Image (cartoon, rainbow, N blue to C red):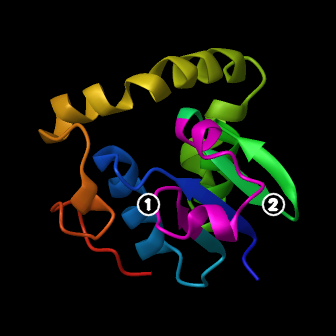
Amino acid sequence: MADLTLFYDGTCPLCVNEINHLKRLDRDQRIAFEDIHAENFTSRYPDVDREEASAILLGDVDGKRIRGLDVTHRAWSLVGRGWLTAPLRWPLIRPVADRVYLWFAPRRYRISGWLTGRQRCESCASGQCGLGDKKS
């Protein structure tokens, strides 16, 4: 059983790029990656609101829901890179980082378009968008 179930947007090129990077680093398979746009997602996770998961990154740790940058930090910590995201959880930085994340999340498609040339990508979910492999 994974230490974290991470619910991500498989149509967002930026999201998929980060997930692919995490997958490469997750050699011990401590993270279960779940695309909220997968065909059978709703039947497998009826308690996860797909709309909420699209608005803010969701994760599950031992049945407890975590959100936003808490998910990001947990995931990167599980692959041994928590030091990269730890400052985002420091008391003085946390409120600012959370507000920036809440600003970023609904704009991620536009930002992805600027950075990758693709705003949304149905082929990202199948690993064909050119943003890395989908190896687990």
Residue drawn at the location 51% of the way across and 53% of the way down:
8
The secondary structure type at the circle numbered 2 is: strand
Q: Amino acid at mark 1?
A: Ile
Horizontal and vertical percent for residue 24? 41, 74
Q: Is residue 37 left or right of residue 69?
A: left
Q: Is residue 128 left or right of residue 52?
A: left
> What label sits on residue 61 in the rendered view?
2
Which quarter of the rendered picture does the C terminus lie within? Answer: bottom left
Q: Nearer the viewer, residue 81 or 63?
A: 63
Horizontal and vertical percent for residue 84? 54, 46
State how far apart marks 2 and 1 are (Cα). 17 Å
Residue hosting label 1? 19
Residue drawn at the location 23% of the way across and 37% of the way down:
119
Of the residues under marks 2 and 1, which one precedes in the sequence? 1
Instruction: Classify mark 2: residues with Cα within 10 Å, few (<14), some (14-19) or many (20+).
Output: some
**Is residue 62 depicted above or below 28 in this figure?**
above
Residue drawn at the location 47% of the way across and 67% of the way down:
39
Q: Amino acid at mark 2?
A: Val
Q: Which residues are magenta?
A: 33-54
Which quarter of the rendered picture does the N terminus lie within? Answer: bottom right
